[in-house]
Image (cartoon, coloured by chain):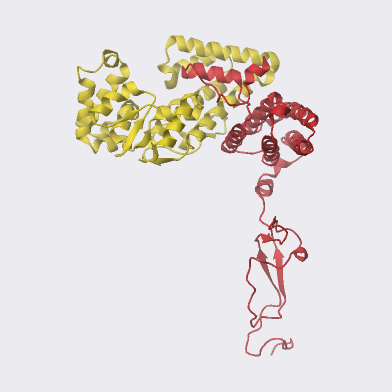
């Protein structure tokens, strides 16, 4: 005979369930406000009734405490932080680069806001500041050559782009790239190449003109030029 | 209207964004679907230009001055056939590039050049796989496909640590071609023909291709080594162009006799 009293809320023929169990839910929830996807770490109390999940049928366990705990999917950034804590340590070798990359991220964000307000003067000055800070970041990126080459590309691209040549999409692409650099300082070569290809597709021109000429000679070709619809030739702008 | 079977020249132009050829090729493929790219084209691209860029990068990483770079270039397989004048031009450009960068930021000059070469190789390889609307066909069991990576010494490594084919596997491209031995004989006859223009007869590529085809026809695919596989080159595309497709190339001259012998169509974008 057990020492605990029988639970009056349960039918007599059902074996006693554990008093408490936790179910991890990791789904996204659609809020009624314009069908916006809300990230799952919002406190549970703030959720509207869940429209994705059908209502549970009442069963024998009805009335038992059911604690639903929300455990969000960790982002790639969070996972990387857990796996490689040294790479995100402000006192570690990547510390100075991370600090400056975060600064660039904030500058890029404020630049898109300035564009939304029609403040093109601020956009132009922000581009120049971003290029300067990227120049300061570069010496600190020796721990990852892939990050270094992405930083170099962005530096040349922001240095040569005029505010009047940039649309909202281009600036948004730049802000996104800046965020990715800050969040993934250990990015792979493949990821860095993908990032640069995306920026080039948006119209940013940041290939090194000297290396381009060298490669032309290496391949024994007469031409190795970017698309004529690209904004401007880097070399021409420097000269 | 027939589909397009791209040879490696089109793929290389697209990966390097060589204009206006890429624009013409894209317009042509858009107007002539479906578009197919044989894995052999990727293999040629990886062994050729991508491998050359990575070799250059690795030689620069290992060298401490220009003399060492020149020596490293001269002994490497990728540069062995480079004409002397071009080799001079390469080293001249390299020196100019370093001098210019050193005058601005001496400490970082070498690193920036290396990283740019590294990124260029990776970008080209990634972009080649993204030809709009193209399907990759004729898989090769010997081909090392995958990503370019940086090893622990900062050197660029090809997929499976190689830019070449898997060791100990019979050449898959030769096996595709050997399936049509009559076609092989026709291509050999076309390259032997007295009708072949003189400048093509004298071309070293034509001679080496004819020898490789002859060897394949007589002894079978097991005799085709990695270098012989590269010599097959244009003959592979002419032989394996699927029915209802035409070979699309920028190198019409070399393809014409091979495609005519096999009653296939070759076009330039």
Q: Nearer the viewer, residue A90 or A194?
A: A194
Task: Note whether B2 is above or below B206 in the view shown.
Answer: below
Horizontal side, residue B196 vs residue A156: left or right:
left
Q: What tint does the image give chain B?
A: yellow
Q: Tell me if A237 is positioned left or right of B9 in this view.
A: right
Q: Horizontal placement of A89 versus B20: left or right?
A: right
**Which residue occupies the foreground of this view, B115 or A83?**
B115
Quarter that holds the N terminus of chain A: bottom right
Q: Position of residue A155 (x, y in %)?
A: 69, 27
Q: Could you say where residue A105 lies in the image, as x and y percent from the top left?
A: 74, 38
User: From the image, which quarter does the C terminus of chain A lie in?
Assistant: top right
Q: Residue at x 66, y 46 (%)?
A: A80
Q: Is residue B212 visible?
A: no
Residue at the spot 77% in from the left edge and 63% down from the top edge: A46
Q: Is residue B267 above or below residue B196?
A: below
Where residue B160 sits in the image (x, y, percent)?
46, 37
Judged left or right of residue B48, residue A38 is: right
Q: Measured from the top left, where is residue B189 in percent x and y?
A: 20, 24
Task: Give the total of numbered labels.
Answer: 0
**Closest to the observer: B182 or A116?**
A116
Name the image quarter holding residue A172. top right
Seen in the picture, residue A233 relative to B144 is either above or below; the reply is: above
Residue B238: image quadrant is top left
Residue A185 versus residue B251 in the image, above or below: below
Along the line of sight, which residue is nearer the eye, B76 or A169? A169
Question: Does residue A129 appear in this view?
Answer: yes
What color is chain A drawn in?
Answer: red
């Amino acid at each position: 005979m057990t020492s605990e009293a029988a639970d009056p809320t349960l039918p007599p023929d059902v074996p006693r369930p554990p008093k408490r169990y936790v179910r991890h839910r990791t789904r996204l929830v659609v809020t009624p406000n314009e069908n916006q996807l809300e990230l799952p770490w919002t406190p549970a109390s703030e959720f509207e009734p869940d429209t994705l999940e059908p209502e549970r049928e009442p069963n024998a366990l009805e009335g038992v405490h059911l604690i639903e705990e929300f455990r969000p999917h960790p982002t790639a950034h969070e996972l990387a932080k857990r796996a490689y804590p040294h790479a995100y340590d402000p006192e570690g070798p990547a510390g100075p680069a991370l600090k400056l990359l975060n600064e660039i991220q904030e500058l890029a964000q404020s630049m898109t806001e300035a564009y939304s307000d029609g403040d093109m003067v601020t956009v132009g000055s922000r581009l120049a500041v971003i290029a300067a800070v990227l120049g300061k970041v570069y010496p600190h990126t020796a721990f990852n050559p892939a990050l270094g080459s992405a930083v170099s590309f962005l530096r040349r691209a922001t240095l040569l782009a005029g505010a009047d040549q940039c649309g909202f999409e281009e600036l948004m692409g730049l802000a996104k790239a800046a965020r990715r650099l800050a969040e993934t300082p250990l990015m792979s070569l493949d990821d860095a190449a993908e990032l640069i290809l995306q920026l080039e597709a948006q119209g940013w021109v940041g290939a090194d003109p000297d290396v381009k000429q060298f490669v032309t000679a290496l391949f024994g070709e007469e031409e190795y030029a970017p698309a004529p619809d690209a904004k401007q030739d880097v070399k021409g702008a420097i000269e | 209207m027939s589909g397009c079977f791209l040879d490696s020249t089109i793929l290389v132009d697209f990966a390097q964004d060589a204009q206006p050829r890429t624009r013409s090729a894209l317009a042509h493929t858009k107007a002539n679907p479906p578009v197919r790219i044989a894995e052999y084209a990727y293999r040629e691209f990886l062994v050729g230009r991508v491998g050359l860029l990575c070799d250059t990068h690795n030689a620069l990483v290992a060298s401490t001055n220009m003399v060492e770079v020149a020596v490293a270039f001269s002994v490497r397989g990728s540069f062995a056939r480079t004409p002397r004048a071009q080799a001079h031009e390469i080293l001249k450009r390299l020196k100019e590039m370093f001098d210019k960068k050193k005058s601005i930021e001496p400490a970082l000059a070498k690193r920036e050049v290396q990283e740019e070469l590294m990124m260029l190789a990776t970008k080209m390889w990634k972009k080649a796989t993204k030809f709009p609307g193209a399907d990759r066909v004729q898989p090769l069991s010997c081909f090392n496909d995958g990503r370019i990576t940086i090893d622990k010494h900062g050197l660029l490594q090809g997929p499976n640590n190689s830019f070449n084919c898997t060791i100990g596997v019979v050449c898959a491209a030769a096996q595709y071609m050997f399936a049509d031995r009559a076609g092989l004989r026709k291509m050999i006859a076309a390259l032997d023909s007295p009708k072949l223009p003189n400048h093509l007869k004298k071309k070293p590529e034509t001679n080496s291709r004819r020898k490789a085809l002859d060897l394949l026809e007589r002894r079978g695919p097991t005799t085709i080594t990695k270098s012989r596989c590269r010599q097959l080159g244009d003959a592979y595309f002419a032989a394996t162009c699927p029915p209802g497709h035409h070979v699309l190339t920028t190198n019409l001259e070399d393809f014409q006799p091979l495609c005519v012998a096999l009653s296939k169509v070759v076009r330039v974008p």
